[in-house]
Structures are given as structure tokens and as C-alpha cells.
Image (cartoon, rainbow, N blue to C red):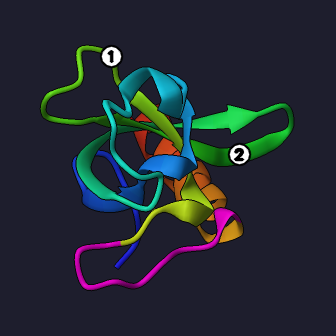
């Protein structure tokens, strides 16, 4: 199962790139797992689909986490390269509309 917009994922608080973990920690350990829904995948320079922008219940600001740090509900992970290939395929499909 590939990561895409709307997918539910899990991640550790310590893996949040933005907002800073210290801003949302509220006394929790960086090892605490959170769950969210992918709003979209974002690029990093020429690398496609490196970050996921996530909607997380209880957070006012979407969280940004590297794709390779995300876990699907079944515990599997996906590499940034796989996500980049998926992002290119989704973009190509959107351009055909």
C-alpha cells in the first residue's frame, strides 16, 4: 500500500520536523506515537515527496514529517524513493484531467 493523500499514518513525536516537537510535546516523551492523515506530500529541492504534511487531531497546525519516518497502521514503512515515485505518478494523473 502506497502513501497518498488521505492515508492514515503513525509517527513518533520526535520525528516531527515542524512544528518543533518541543512546541507540541506538553510533557510527552519523543517516543510517543501520534497518528494523522496525509494532506499532501511535499518536495525538498529536487527530491520529490520527501515530506508529508499531516492533519493531526489536537494540533492547531499541520505537522510535517519525513516520509521515511512514517508508519502505516499495520506498522510498515515506505521509503522516500517509493513516495517520490508515487508523487510523480499522482501528479501525472492530475495533469491529464
Residue at point 37%, 27% (across, down): 24
Where is mark 2, residue-wise?
A: 48
Quadrant containing the C terminus in the rendered view = top left
Q: Is residue 62 magenta?
A: no
Q: Residue furthest top?
A: 60
SS class of the residue under badge 2?
A: strand
38 or 12: nearer the viewer: 12
Residue at point 41%, 84% (across, down): 76
Q: What is the chief secondary structure element of the magenta stretch?
A: loop
**Disc 2 residue crowd, few under 14, some 14–19, many 20+, Cα 10 Å:** some
23 or 9: nearer the viewer: 23
Tag of residue 61: 1
Q: In which quarter of the image is residue 56?
A: top left
Tell me where residue 77 appears, x and y as whole percent. Answer: 48, 78
Residues at marks 2 and 1 touching, judged by CB atoms closer than 8 Å: no
Between circles 2 and 1, the one closer to the viewer is 1
* Sequence-first tag of 2 and 1: 2
Range shown magenta:
72-80
Distance, label 2 to label 1, CA atoms, is 23 Å
**Disc 1 residue crowd, few under 14, some 14–19, many 20+, Cα 10 Å:** some
Question: Height in image: 92 above or below 76?
Answer: above
47 left or right of 40? right
Q: Is residue 76 magenta?
A: yes
Question: Height in image: 96 above or below 61?
Answer: below
Tell me where residue 87 appears, x and y as whole percent. Answer: 55, 50
Tag of residue 1: none
Q: Quadrant of residue 1?
A: bottom left
72 left or right of 31? left
Amino acid at each position: 500500500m502506497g502513501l497518498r493523500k488521505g492515508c492514515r499514518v503513525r509517527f513518533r513525536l520526535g520525528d516531527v520536523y515542524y512544528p518543533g516537537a518541543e512546541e507540541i510535546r506538553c510533557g510527552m516523551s519523543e517516543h510517543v506515537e501520534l497518528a494523522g492523515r496525509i494532506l499532501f506530500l511535499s518536495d525538498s529541492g529536487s527530491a520529490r515527496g520527501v515530506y508529508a504534511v499531516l492533519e493531526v487531531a489536537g494540533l492547531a497546525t499541520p505537522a510535517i514529517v519525513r516520509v521515511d519516518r512514517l508508519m502505516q497502521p499495520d506498522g510498515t514503512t515506505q521509503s522516500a524513493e517509493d513516495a517520490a515515485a508515487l508523487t510523480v505518478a499522482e501528479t501525472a494523473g492530475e495533469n491529464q484531467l
